[in-house]
Image (tube, helix red, strand yellow):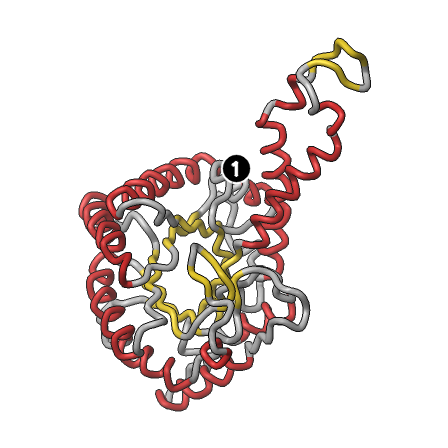
Amino acid sequence: KELDFSASGHFTPQHLDQAILMPRNFVDQFAMVCLHDLTHSAASCVRVCLQGALHVRQVAELYGVPVILHTDHCMRSWLPWFDGLMEANEKHFELHGEPLFSSHMLDLSEEPLEENIATCKEYLERMAKFNCLLEMELGVTGGEEDGVDNTDVDSSRLYTQPEEVWEVYKALSEVEGGAFTIAAAFGNVHGVYAPGNVDLRPDILHNTQKYVAEKLGGDDPLPCLFVFHGGSGSSVEDIRYAIDAGTIKMNIDTDTQWAFWDGIRQYEAKYHDYLQAQIGNPEGETKPNKKYYDPRMALRSGEEVMRDRLCQAADDLNCVNVVPVL
């Protein structure tokens, strides 16, 4: 099917087995699954992510879903975790001819630009050898996520300048075989806020593409591949406008968290009178309630509502009917 530009949705699992992969039954799309666990030691986090990656690979094959495996924000203090993932990719590539993960993100956006670029380039040179994409971040995404609170950050840091993107593009393009995306800030925030509290400026991406294209002097009007962080709560108009500017991935977490919870909330509201005791409900004092308080029932409701939200996200991103049925 002919489409305008499209982008993939990046989803952090809330209930991995079903909710993220189920949309494939409704729209022909692929899934981008993000694994991220930094609550323990680096070695433990590596093990958790490797287990998740191997699990997703097996489940994706059973569902017939093409999956992109990605890891999220990694700041400098978390590089031991990142290094462990690099080693796992190298071993998997040696055995299977492909990396275990499709891509990884380095978030050194709070460091000086020169240090951010230098470290990203160093890792991209390593990743290029096993065909793995690097996502790097410029500027700051507002809000709070994973214990990083940027709610009170200087608003000027929420908007990346074209000159900064050019420096990144110029340096990383020097890496032979390197593939990279740039998460440039244009007012994005983690979380959902009341109208008027977020000034999203996707026009910054358009202006940046024009600036870089002029620097290159070629025929490509969209030389940069952008990532849209903090996509939850964004209007379809802003999403599509960002896609027109070369955005190929949008992170969606807060909206899917709410959807999963909302499904559980709806289930409890519907069966409230059947969930107050093991025995006794509106149908009779001796009627058992086991089939209602079985936790799988409430979780299933959460999965179904989250599935519908993912299908909506795929439509918003023009990511429907882009992959042939396997």
Q: Which residue is mark 1?
A: 18
Task: Choose between 127 and 43: the one closer to the eye.
Answer: 43
Work out whether 244 lies above or below 38: below
Q: Quadrant of residue 26?
A: top right
Q: Quadrant of residue 78?
A: bottom left
Tell which residue pokes out farthest to the top in this image.
286
Q: Residues within 10 Å of mark 1 (few under 14, many from 20)?
A: some
Name the spot of residue 316 as percent of width and height, x first.
61, 61
* Number of marks in picture: 1
Q: Quadrant of residue 129?
A: bottom left
Name the residue rendered at 60%, 23% in the picture: 294
Name the residue rendered at 44%, 71% in the picture: 140
Name the spot of residue 3 as percent of width and height, x first.
58, 65
Work out whether 291 lies above or below 48: above
Tell which residue pokes out farthest to the right in this image.
283
Q: Amino acid at mark 1?
A: Gln
Image quadrant in which the N terminus is located? bottom right
Name the spot of residue 273 as percent of width and height, x first.
76, 25
Task: Choose between 127 and 47: the one closer to the eye.
Answer: 47
